[in-house]
Image (cartoon, helix red, strand yellow):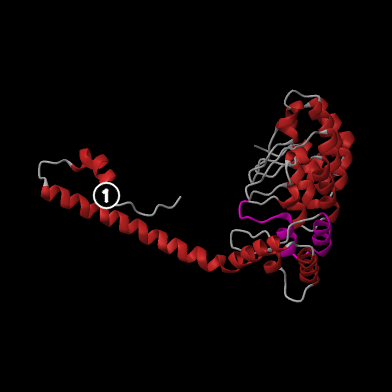
Amino acid sequence: MERTPLHDAAKEGDVRRVGVLVEERKEYLWTKDERGRLPIHYAASFGGPAVVRFFAVHANGHPKGGDMINAQIKDGRTPLHLASEKGDAASLEVLVREGRADPWIRDENGWLPMHSAAWFGQPEAVRFFLKYNASHPERGDMLNERDYKGNTPLSCAVQEGHVKCVRLLLEAGADVTIANEEGETPLDLAEEGSDILSLLTCKLSLLTLNEKPEERRKRGKIEKLNKNMKDLCGKFQIQRLALVEAELEFTLVWSQRIQSSYPICDFKSCSPGIGHSKPSLIEFH
């Protein structure tokens, strides 16, 4: 793995030099640097839409073009993730429309490119993915998609204090009640007294006004669970461990009792029968 002159030309956005280098050394297109980045990753991060278009068009005409346009670096990010972080909506347009890049590929955090756009506070990139999401309902709801820790794009934007992105996501219908693995909703993540907290509170108030009685009851239950989630998770893990230890101790005692009552019995060979006869314990999945 080594950085090539094509990486540098892509980073600089020098389309002419990129073309010359590809003509001379086509293998450069597939050469990765020490972090697993192809020249197209440099183009998406730094080069701009013109040089991104060169790679997108070339990828379309190559049997393995999809492997390039959706190539993931060591942390799982694709060219779409990188362009999203930069907020380069023009490059996003080129990658998706001309390169047929897939915006549903996740990085090592479980982030879609839309999560990246929200986290880095890039409203133009967020707007691009909202339009894509609305025009491709068959692929799922990107708006409320969770990462591996349960955070939605709205949660990401709220945590980093990006008001414009939060407003865009709320206007598109982002769910303010979705909790992450820590039991935190966007309201919990918002800074006290911030404009973002006001936006979220306003959104929740509007939802509450339009709720039917049954919906209100369900929301109340959800909010109650979210409020206690942290403590419940901690207690649950302790209880689960205690039950596992109790079951192991029970099995050992049962084994000793059987063997003392029936010395000729081999516990291993009897375990299926014993398993059916002993009292059932609570199982957690």
Q: Is residue 150 highlighted in magenta?
A: yes
- Camera sees residue 87: no
Residue 122, image x, y percentages:
82, 55
- Camera sees residue 274: yes
User: Which residues fall within the magenta stretch?
Assistant: 148-172
Question: How many marks do you count on the picture?
Answer: 1
Residue 253, image x, y percentages:
21, 55
* For residue 225, side relative to residue 162 (left or right): left
Q: Is residue 240 above or below residue 14?
A: below
* For residue 36, side relative to residue 194 (left or right): left
Q: Is residue 168 highlighted in magenta?
A: yes
Residue 191, image x, y percentages:
72, 72
The amino acid at mark 1 is: Lys
Residue 222, image x, y percentages:
63, 62
Is 76 in front, or is 282?
282
Is 24 in front, or is 242?
242
Q: Which residue is mark 1?
A: 278
Classed neighbour count for the residue bearing mark 1: other residues with Cα under 10 Å, few (<14), some (14–19), many (≥20):
few
Which residue: 78% across, 68% down? 205
Element class at badge 1 = loop
